[in-house]
Amino acid sequence: MIQPRTLKGFRDFLPARMMAREAIIDVARHVYRSYGFAPIDTPVLELFEILDGKGGEESDRLIYRFTDHGNREVGMRFDLTVPLARFVAQHSNELGMPFKRYHIAKVWRGENTHRGRYREFTQCDFDTIGTTSVASDIEMLLVINDLMLAIDIEQFTMRVSHREILNGVLEKLDLLSKSAGVLRAIDKLAKIGRDKVIAEMVDCGVTSVVQAKEILKIADLSGSTGEILDAAFKLVSGNERGEAGISQLREIVQGTRAGGVRPERLTVDVSIARGLDYYTGTIVETFLDELPEIGSVCSGGRYDDLAGVYTKQQLPGIGASLGLDRLMAALEEMSKLSQSATAAPVLITFFDANRLHEYLGLARQIRAAGIGVEVYPNPTKLGQQLRFADRRGFQVAIIAGDQEFERGQCQVKDLRSSKATDVSLQNDAAKVVELIQKLIASRESRGWPG
Amino acid sequence: MIQPRTLKGFRDFLPARMMAREAIIDVARHVYRSYGFAPIDTPVLELFEILDGKGGEESDRLIYRFTDHGNREVGMRFDLTVPLARFVAQHSNELGMPFKRYHIAKVWRGENTHRGRYREFTQCDFDTIGTTSVASDIEMLLVINDLMLAIDIEQFTMRVSHREILNGVLEKLDLLSKSAGVLRAIDKLAKIGRDKVIAEMVDCGVTSVVQAKEILKIADLSGSTGEILDAAFKLVSGNERGEAGISQLREIVQGTRAGGVRPERLTVDVSIARGLDYYTGTIVETFLDELPEIGSVCSGGRYDDLAGVYTKQQLPGIGASLGLDRLMAALEEMSKLSQSATAAPVLITFFDANRLHEYLGLARQIRAAGIGVEVYPNPTKLGQQLRFADRRGFQVAIIAGDQEFERGQCQVKDLRSSKATDVSLQNDAAKVVELIQKLIASRESRGWPG
């Protein structure tokens, strides 16, 4: 006998959780498509040379890699961006530019599981390739805004910045070549505090504490979006790079308002540092106001050159990724996930062993009205069947035996109130359908799936 | 520079094909759910001991396996049935029985690619675990029937049989112990012909050509479903096992008719032999009448004991699997796949560089009516934008510059007829939405996504 178990860092999804995941994925697909992003898919396995070195040293170490049956070195993808780069370079003629795609799929990283991290998780990416237009930066934020609202999250904040603002500050101080180290230090501000960040900056090439404090001013900016942009402008004034970044950020803020984003849902936060070496322009992180400590649930930004290692064609792009696993954890913590484990709201009990055909026919009539129905497969005791219905989360049970069928009726039982009603089976069970629709509609939504 | 390419036997899906796949998967999910099958998911990687030996020697050889970072022997799943067995054994208390699940996911086999086979493909499985009731056998066929119709395939035939019929014939001849070899031989009937099948039967233990011919009689039965069942009954008469199989098959045929399956869509074919060692009762294969040579697009059957290697609990089950890749190949061959590569039907051209905010606002109004809109990101020449729209398969383009905006109008262009109409932007662009809805509805469906 082999012990049934999953690998460390891997999870099964049981029906209640999987239905919630499918519902959120459906919403993401719908929102992405409503902006013209189209789905693609790529293989889980890539030649290792495609993945090698693309995510930095740490990623390389975490890749699940092996030699396949044909002696090829292969690896499981660790994100959806490297496969996108390979895909766009390979198919660019057929795709045409601009190219907007979404990709919702699993990725794998052999991470340390101590920090509650999983080794298999799902990313929901959307990207626009082939344009440097600020219209696409604005659109990324509109998509995130619509996505959060469609998931029924009203209280959220997108924090945006532009990499060229910090670069402008650094260039003014003649420290542009130290930007990677400075970014890494600033990224730790919340965790380790000002003094240690200053010390780390000095360690990585910032010449004095005075300079480090000058750099840190960008992390101290506060106030309204307009005030922050004005103050940031003073910090970079005279530097072309920094001024261009702020000017773009202004356009982006105005554009998102024209596109319908409420001002309080978009703040400029010049201290966010995400995607150290990768992003070159706009960057965004999205926080739930109720649970900021869970971290950003949707992050992204602009990059100058997606696929430079695969093609000579310059392919700029911008996009973001919804972190499905983190979002699900947040929804769970906010009690926004339903516990129901049934995909159909109605159970037809198998009450009379000789009436299977009638149950199948009735199920067909109810399904024809667009309502899901499960027929219990065995004529076991009614009490057992009703306990099953309750445990699974069915909303309505239908009970009918010889007596009911002879009267041309069945019993429709609301499983919440336990109230049972005799209803006519005439006219393709129209009255039964009508009552079920009423009962289902009267239920308050108890969370995802909504 | 690294050459961008996919591994041999693996494929990218570009937008047009991926949208068709997503549409078919949505249909499958909808049909499965309408019968109360709920989704689950399991990890792509399993401990190798979980997969080892579960699909026979050939499967073991084909498994992608390796040693992970923690020195564990792991493998990528080669089907969804072995993970289901492990899953049900591991979670049976929490799941409760009967348990109905669907699972739509990728599987991997290091197959020889000569025969046009892929090494990564998608299965769409549905199974009912924990009951031996014939109601579940009937339901499996109702689901396949609904699935085909929902995919817009009207001409199909489900061929059903019952493993105990052949077993009955063999038991009467005192050859029950040779059933695996006999099944393998019969399975080749169409390929190698009667004489070679008879020779192969004799090779694997059937004692004489006379006996082999006696067995082959079950492959010769023809006529109406009732005639075949009657004739098969004569072949097994007196044998309990065979008679029980035929009696169940009769119940199943009657049940599917009560459930709404047209008689011509279900035939009894005692010669189908699928799932050599695995299935123990009802078996089914589904053929497209237009393309029978492509093979069964949806196959399944009943098994006595799903998870015997993982648990002492006896878990009978029944289910089937839609072969998505084979079905997509068939739809392509029948010209039922759309070539459109856009997820949104409407393109707002970026005609006037100063009017981005108006375009974003208009896009928002159209999206609010449930219609997908892409805004072209750059103010390039209109001709280039319209060629882009045409190539991608957009249905409607919207063009508006200073003149139009000053008149409070925009131009709505039907990209099929090239007819352009000036429409008012008043009242949240209500007239624009109305015209777009009319234009989209008037398009005939040109295949999946429908």
Image: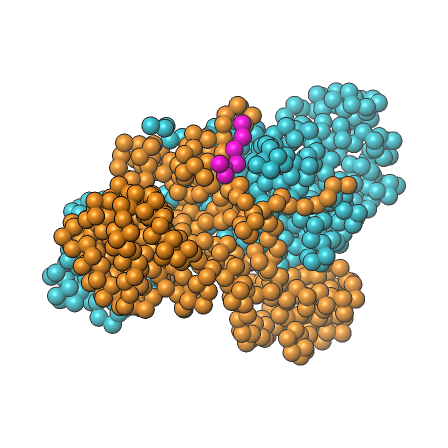
Chain colours: A cyan, B orange
Considering only vertical position in the picture, is B34 above or below B175? below
Q: Position of residue B380 (x, y in %)?
A: 78, 63
Q: Position of residue A107 (x, y in %)?
A: 57, 39
Q: Position of residue B51 (x, y in %)?
A: 43, 34
Q: Nearer the viewer, residue A192 or B249?
A: B249
Residue shown at the point (76%, 46%) measured from the top left: A311
Q: Is residue B373 visible?
A: yes
Q: In the picture provided, is B402 more to the left or to the right than B423?
A: right
Considering only vertical position in the picture, is B158 above or below A43? below
> In the picture, residue A62 is in which quadrant?
top right
Residue shown at the point (86%, 43%) measured from the top left: A240
Residue shown at the point (76%, 66%) measured from the top left: B384
> In the picture, residue B369 is in which quadrant?
bottom right
Q: Position of residue B150 (x, y in %)?
A: 42, 64
- Range covered by the magenta-colored residues: B61-67
Q: Is residue A346 visible?
A: no
| Residue B440 part of the magenta-drawn span | no
Q: Nearer the viewer, residue A35 or A263?
A: A35
